[in-house]
Image (spheres, rainbow, N blue to C red):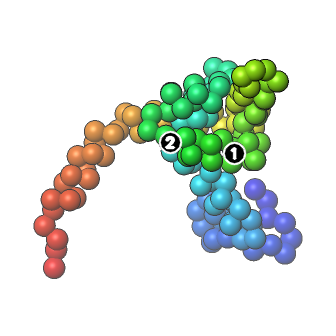
Amino acid sequence: MDQAAGTEPAASRGPCAAIPAEQMAFIREILDRVGDKWSTLIIALLEDGPLRYSDLQHDVPGISQRMLSHTLRQLHQDGLVTRTAYAEVPPRVEYALTPLSRSLLDIVKQLIGWASDHHDEIRRNRAEAETAVPRR
């Protein structure tokens, strides 16, 4: 990313060096959103097409109704999912990926795959760290 005239980079090196300091807070917000556990799972789940709320709740293990509603609302607000309400009885609402979130899909799937591939190793490392004798 080219720095505009008169803008200071957020850092002197690393990935933040390419980001103007005045954009850094918003960049962190975006990373919080797209990198949180519920958003990544929902985005990956919607890869094959629109799903109803109840399907999402069923297929995202451990998510509460409140957290699913909150996460879907945030993803919709950021333009990462569409929400389509059908005028039926009973009402039907479907959620789907947008082109913006489709551009994120491969990254999300890789991150989930990496976590799945390495969870045993990370679990062992955590257990070792918990039982390690603290150094003085």
- The residue drawn where x is 54% and y is 32% is 57
Residue 131 lies in quadrant: bottom left
Amino acid on which the number 2 mark rests in the picture: Ser
Q: Earlier in the sequence, mark 1 or mark 2?
A: 2
The single residue placed furthest to the front in the displayed view is 89
Kindly state the secondary structure of the residue where label 2 is placed: loop
List x then y, in percent, for residue 98: 75, 33
Q: How busy is the neighbourhood of tag 1: few (under 14 within 10 Å), some, or many (20 plus)?
A: some
* Quadrant occupied by the N terminus: bottom right
- Above or below, 8 against 16 in this view is below
Give the residue pinned by disc 1. 73
Residue 66 appears anywhere in the view: yes
- The residue drawn where x is 45% and y is 34% is 61
Residue 80 lies in quadrant: top right
How far apart in space, not on screen, are marks 1 and 2 (Cα)?
Answer: 14 Å
Amino acid on which the number 1 mark rests in the picture: Arg
Give the residue pinned by disc 2. 64
Kindly state the secondary structure of the residue where label 1 is placed: helix
